[in-house]
Amino acid sequence: MPVNTETKNAILITDKDAQYDERAKRLLGQKSILAHILVKTVDEFMGMNPKDVISYIEGEPFINTVPVEPGLTNTVVEKDSQRVVGFNSENQEIHEGTIRFDIIFYVRMRDGLSQIIVNVEAQKDEPEKYEILNRAIFYVSRMISSQKEKDFSNSNYNDIKRVYSIWVCMNMPENSLEHIHLVKDSIVNFHEWKGKMDLVNIVMIGLAKELPKHEEKYELHRLLGALLSQDLTANEKLDIIGNEYAIPMEKDFREDVSIMCNLSQKIKETGIEMGKREMIMKMYNKGYTAAQIADVAEMDEKKIKDIIKNAELLTV
């Protein structure tokens, strides 16, 4: 059975959306971008030059490869006859359909000894099916529990690493930056319990649709807003990122920005086409002739008739 135009367009948008999301994660996962995020969200790096923070990011960030689900986050390998537990970055096809961390990586602290684990998630919109903070809490919980036998063993809970789950949420009503963490309330008397209150950290970054001016308060918002914008051209993005933030423009970075902008344009065009077809059928069902619809839609009458004919065939 042939696939109708509406279905093709829906599939195209879904496919382009997936490709767009993949490019967005790759761009966010660039160390130079992650360094800018760290200097605005992690106490130890605040006030530092992002260029100086890059060297503290250990190895290459895992991008869309490490599963979130219990039992799948870690993998066990044999190295020099010893059992080593690390992040599971196996072939994605093995666990197809599995939810994965967008970006996850280790950061060495300035003392040269301790580490933190950082996860960065990108959201196009605030989800409607669930409350986003609940998902963020689940993610930081997994980042803590998955350290067992990887970052600490047996009952050595003092070796648990601090974790940050940083959520970049686009298309929000206003720009915002909030740190959500554990607090202690003394209800009956006071006792100084031993332990680290700063192990669990959630950071929510809200990006407004309109790009803010370049000022210190919204420095991170302007950078991320430009990087993830679906309205700016590739040249406009590169101008802001390269000239205002002095971020090196490597060839791969430029290509990802260019491809992401092209995908964004195709998503818009396909969405507009779907909207026009929906309008045409609404007018037709209300009794307008093909000629009248063509006049309003500023389209060829034959094309209007073809759209109506295809739609009627689908309802048979």
Image (spheres, rainbow, N blue to C red):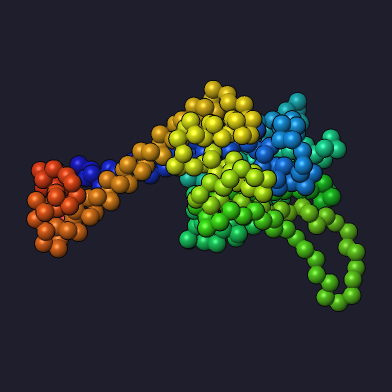
Q: Position of residue 45 (x, y in %)?
A: 77, 41
Asked whether 156 or 256 is in front, the reply is 256
Q: Is residue 146 left or right of residue 313?
A: right
Q: Is residue 107 left or right of residue 226?
A: right
| Residue drawn at the location 88% of the way across and 59% of the way down | 194
Asked whether 5 or 218 is in front, the reply is 218
Q: Position of residue 26 (x, y in %)?
A: 55, 35
Q: Identify the image quadrant of the N terminus.
A: top left
Residue at the limit of the structure toward the bottom, as seen here: 188
| Residue drawn at the location 52% of the way across and 35% of the way down | 237
Q: Using the rendered image of the protein, determine whether residue 92 is visible from the camera's viewpoint.
A: no
Q: Position of residue 182 (x, y in %)?
A: 75, 60
Q: Position of residue 150 (x, y in %)?
A: 73, 41
Asked whether 176 or 277 is in front, the reply is 176
Q: Identify the image quadrant of the C terminus.
A: bottom left
Q: Is residue 240 left or right of residue 43?
A: left
Where, by quadrant of the figure, is residue 269 drawn? top left
